[in-house]
Amino acid sequence: MTERLQNIALVGNPNSGKSSLFNALTGLNQKVGNFPGVTVDKKTGKLSLSPELQVNVTDLPGTYSLYPKSDDEVVTFDVLFDDDEQMKIDCVVVVVDASNLKRNLLFCSQIFDIRKPVIVALTMMDIARQKGLQIDVQALSRELGYPVVAINPRNNKGITELKKQLASIILGHYEIPQRDFIDHQHLAPEIIATVKKYKTVSSDYAAIHFAGAFPKLSIISEASKQSLAEELQKLSFNKTRLQAEETLLRYARIKKIMQVSVFETDPQKLELRSRKWDEYLLHPVYGYLFLLFVLFMMFQSVFWLAQFPMDWIDQGFSWSLHRLKDLMPGGFLTDLLVDGVLAGINGIVVFIPQIMLLFGMITLLEDSGYMSRISFLTDRLMRSVGLNGKSVMPMISATACAVPAIMAARTIENKKEKLITILITPFMSCSARLPVYTILIGLVIPEQKLWGFFSLQGLMMMALYILGFLMALLAAWVMNRFIAKMEKSIFLMELPVYRMPRWKNAGITMVQKARVFVTDAGKIILLISVILWALSSYGPGENGKPSRSELENSYAGIVGKSIEPAIRPLGYDWKIGIALITSFAAREVFVGTMATLYSVDEEDEKTLKQKMQSAVFSDGQKVYGLATGMSLMIFYAFAMQCMSTLAIVKRETGKWKYPILQFILMGGVAYLSSWLVYQLFS
């Protein structure tokens, strides 16, 4: 039996630098999945401490304490307290923001009392110095009883020392301090004794935590939950009161530790640059103007910078496909390879430059600290439609993908606001729509420059993203009037300091997102492309058996012709109808579908864009005129064409009625809006 790798967990408060440390430790050797049994994002990676010593690193969701409130915090609790031999954590790295040391040490001290090996990684030491804090790292380590390493993941400072400390712990050259951070036996002796009858725990503190969290946990049976609840009730267990007493004890000791290890100059003479920036970037007028400017420049750059590699890829594939057909013998295998497989791959690879650029820019905004300001800035706007600033982050992340964005809504405590956020998030234009927007904008919007600089195509792309956001707000406003109010909501948020973004971090994200697009969306696109090639190349023969057919007489052609009357009022032909059907697997399949259909139908060296530009209806009218192109963009902006999103909505809400309602309403809005746009531009 292969010996398992040691497991290291990264924990810390939000915005403490935990994700940057994870990237610095694991680089590109990481993957994203879900924690077992839940849909919370799980980032894991491999770390090489030496040629002979490899470990697993898990980046746990950020949290302010070990008292779980949201689903993300429950996951952190579950992982840290899990004693399963294969899954248990062997070492915890607590990432501590040195500029907010007192608050961060509260959570850090809770981790100490779990009784696992711990390393404290101090980040943002430069910000601490700006605030007038001088931290004696050695004294802090001595007072805490655990190793403390000052790090800066942005320039890899301290990473080597951190790896040495990790290797020392993994190799067993480390002993956990015998004394808890605070005296738990004095705090709650009867509670601890009662919990230990039902669950083997690693420490007295783990027993106290278990008493407060066990109803939400999956590591204890329902029968044991009921019995434990009855005994705790007899002891008049009050989780809130006990937590308050514990917090006071912890802060009392933290105060003594900071008196010894931290020197603070006169804070009144120091002012962070972040506050000065916020006077303008969070201004009720200038703040919104700057936000629009940032979005404008982002989409301009995506179109301008990605145009060149996209053209090279498209032209290269067109030339290669034509040459292959000349070199290879005609027949089934050649057609399958060229018109099915390679045409489908072309529909995948050509959009990688835009996807990488978009995600790279979003990562830079997050790394700089500005993304959190967007939530704060839009809180007033969100409240006007019945939400609050917490709904903005899922909506922003939906520009990448609606699935993790809907998962992110679980951090919203208010049930009504959480439900509305889940239902409106798919209106935000995700990266799957990006290939569709790109090819349609290129077909119907001229490559003109306004004032010699601003791209008209980039402006159209930005308008589509803003349109999705506005439709989401309108839908939220309507839902707010029909869904009963459940409880009040309070929006509290910590704003991180502004800092220079780390380009390496953006580069890692760009490569990751390209890899995910190719491996996840690419597999779907390729599979559907091959199936569609078969359906487009064969049709019912004279004896009912499949035989080679012209595209219009193929199985795909028959299906497309049958639905054409329903979509003709929108300006679509039967080929677009086929693409609408295949797009329900994934929106980006639209491009792969077009590539396959036009590859089967035409045997020339034109690019896909050129083939679509020359497509005409039976009356000679261009298929992809301005009216049809605009109508199709609006349809893809509003329609719910993603089976994965529907599945995750059902999982998050626990009911099928919500995704079914979502599918019907978004489809209806898409159809009516597209019809109106087609009539307007015809």
Image (cartoon, grey):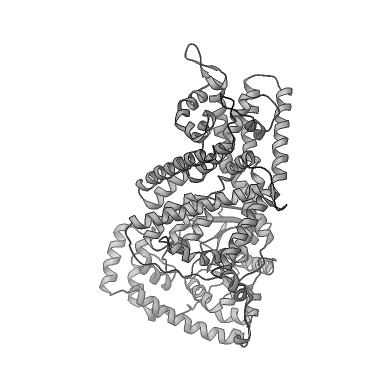
Give the image quarter of residue 95: bottom right
Residue placed most toward the observer, 1 or 238: 238
Q: Can you give x and y, in whole percent of width and height, for residue 63 in the image?
A: 49, 67
- Tally the marks: 0
In-front residue for pair 28/143:
28
Q: List the single residue furthest toward the top.
A: 543
* Residue 517: quarter of image: top right
Residue 9 rendering spot, x and y as whole percentages: 54, 62
Q: Is residue 454 left or right of residue 563?
A: right
In the rendered image, the vertical position of residue 102 relative to residue 384, given as above or below: below
Residue 374 position (above or below residue 444): below
In-front residue for pair 231/314: 314
Q: Is residue 406 something one can see in this rendering? A: no
632, above or below 179, in the image: above
**x then y, percent, for residue 296:** 62, 56
Residue at 62%, 37% in the rendered image? 347
- Residue 113 appears in the figure: yes
Residue name at image x 70 percent, y 49 percent: 449
Q: Between residues 354 and 77, which one lies in front from this camera angle?
A: 354
Give the quadrant of the C terminus: top right
Q: Quadrant of residue 622?
A: top right
Left/right placement of residue 562 relative to residue 96 reads left
Report the residue at 57% width, 19% height from top.
550
